[in-house]
Image (cartoon, rainbow, N blue to C red):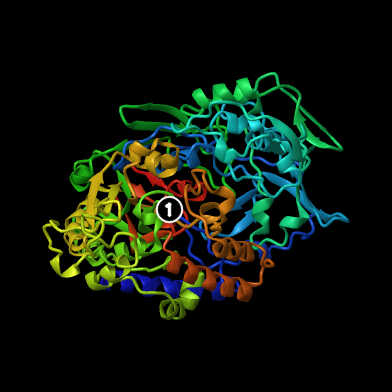
Amino acid sequence: MKKFLAILLAAVMLIGVLAACGSDVPPVDPGPGTTDPGTTDPGTTDPGTPVDPNVPETRSFPAINASGTLTVSYNAPSTGEYVSGWGNSSYDVTIRNLLHGDYGTVAVTPASEMIINDTVVKDFSVSDDAAGNRTYTFTIWDDLKWSDGTGITAKDFVASALFVRSPAWTAVGASTSSYDALVGVVEYGGGVPIYSEEPDDWDDEDGENPFEPEITGYEVEPSDYFAGVSLLGDYELSVTIDGEELPYFFELMYASIGPTPLHVWAPGVNIISDANGSKFDADILEHLTRVSETERFAPSVTCGPYKFVSFENEIITVEVNEHFLADAFGNQPKIQFIQQISVASELTVDSLFSGVFDLYPFEIRGGNIERVMAEPGFSTHSYLRDGYGLMNIVHDWGPTEDLNVRWALAHLVDRQAVLDQVLGGFGGLIDTEASEAQWMYQARRAEVMAAIKPIALNVSVANDYLDQTEWKFESDGETPFDRDQANAEGTYLRHNADGVVLRVRNGAASEDVGAIIEIETIRNAALAGMQFTSEFLEWATVLSHFYYGSDLPEDERLYSTFSMGTGLGVPFDPYYSWHSDFLGTWMNPTFYDSQIDDLIIKMRNTEPGDYATYLEVWFDYVVRWNYLLPALPLYANMYVDMFNDRVSGIEAVTPFANWAHPNVITQLSVAG
């Protein structure tokens, strides 16, 4: 714990220095990976800032001079998906960022600040119409290229929105939250139909849809046009934010749009743009079906600093994209090849020492960190994690539907054992959805701790909660459960009136954390009459059961909780995780609370730059979140990147930008 607190203190001191040097307002919290919150809120960027009249008409970049191979390790098998939309694992997201990152109109810096990306945007303007809609008009540079040498034009940017908000995108099993604030997104996505039957009646007992419901009309008429996106020229486009979505604390994010290779995803298809907005001139379902089956797993053309080479035998290989100009700050990649390889968790340090790989990011295990710190020729870089370890909880099925069961579980899991036996001093405890890296949590930490219900191991309190549930009987379903008869062997358990035992099964994504949870919690749970088990699962199985468990037949649903980790997002916007607009999707599989919905919207609708209001609403949000326990926070930890001395530049990693962030990878190099 002392190591964690010492590094936390150093980080807080650093934040003060950065804020003093760069701004007199607090930084914006972004999210999962990296940011040293010492920057101003993206929303404080004046959307009407005049364009610099001295922007040159042409520019030139030197040819990329890259060499060497960086080998990065990870502990879980990759799912091998490198196009956003299908719920990638975090390991695939790192590769996805290398392939597709930093050619959007807006860039998120390693300090979590949102800025106009000058490498992409030549100039821009902002205007409002009488209805309150806000239009961002961008002129992009004409020297951007895809990895195959084809020029990137404004069509590729407009195509991005047209692809992922089309009905065809959902038809191929993908989803997105991108561009959801733009004018006409609902109409372009298929409108809002009125059906002859209610959706709840569509599925039979096996979860299959036995018939196509008849559409009898529309609440919102569909349109072939996406009104909020316009193609204005070969290198000019605009996006129009719906005035009803404003204000938004992170407004610049709504203006962010990046390119998709139209010539690869839908060859021969063109874009029509007029006063109605933009649309494709042909059906794209067949094209997107092919994308979901091919490009999704092996992108043939990319615009990021790297291009895809192969994924074989759990080794992902990418090569520098020689047509990539630079990141948002004008920096170019220095490493020729990057390989991400799977190494068994227990072999991590020995494999690093023997040269199997150069870099192991995101380490949380104290024993491994100590070994590397003591070994000549190897180094570590530590930073606060903008996220936390947790047990994700199922809310629509099983015992954890009951809030009292969730709170009982919170008092049965020995989180301190995880800290002591896994993190070894490189972590602490947190009791709500927050991270030590967030400026909000640092500003109101003491008040949050005073306002929320503490989570702590206490079998007696767990019994109190369970006595308020349906599981308050012996096996006959009638005799009241007697807590004094409960024992560590689990021979006396709680049942409901139907004689069903109280059972919670956990699926563990981390074998190390899962083992500690299993060993410590089984005994504690038994003393409260709960049968608890924890199983280590392949990562793909965890994702499948957590994200899509509600689609499984009843007899195939096995797990009520999943021990894993999460990042908090850049920017921090829980709308995409906990709001009911996404209920039943992989983004929010099973959770709903009207008050959480309201607080999320209030945070989003705070005027850019109004930190005081945002902070107050955020405070109410984390207090409510703690009360409901949508998930059980296990630990807030440091991340430690461990590497050999071939690697330099890793200090560019921050709490909000990992090694694969487009503005970090350009800082890394390898010797030899």
Residue at figure coordinates x 66%, y 20% from the top left: 267
Q: In this view, does 461 lie to the left or right of 245?
A: left
- Quadrant where the C terminus lies? top left
Give neighbour class at mark 1: few <14, some 14-19, many 20+ (Cα, 10 Å): many
Amino acid type, mark 1: His
Q: Quadrant of residue 109?
A: bottom right
As displayed, is residue 200 above or below residue 30? above
- The residue to which callout 1 is attached is 395
> Compared with residue 365, is residue 187 higher up or lower down, i.e. above or below?
above
- Residue in front for this viewpoint, 435 or 60: 435
Q: Nearer the viewer, residue 670 or 603?
A: 603
* Residue 71 visible: no
146 left or right of 125 in image = left
In this view, the residue in front, 90 or 145, is: 90
Residue 271 picture quarter:
top right
Q: Is residue 33 something one can see in this rendering?
A: yes
Task: Describe the element under mark 1 as helix, strand or loop.
Answer: loop
Q: Residue placed at 71% from the left, 38% from the top?
A: 194
Observer-nearest of 666 and 587: 587
Where is residue 521? Give x, y as percent.
21, 59
Residue at position x 71%, y 56% from top? 245
Provide residue 31's location: percent of width, then percent of height: 49, 58
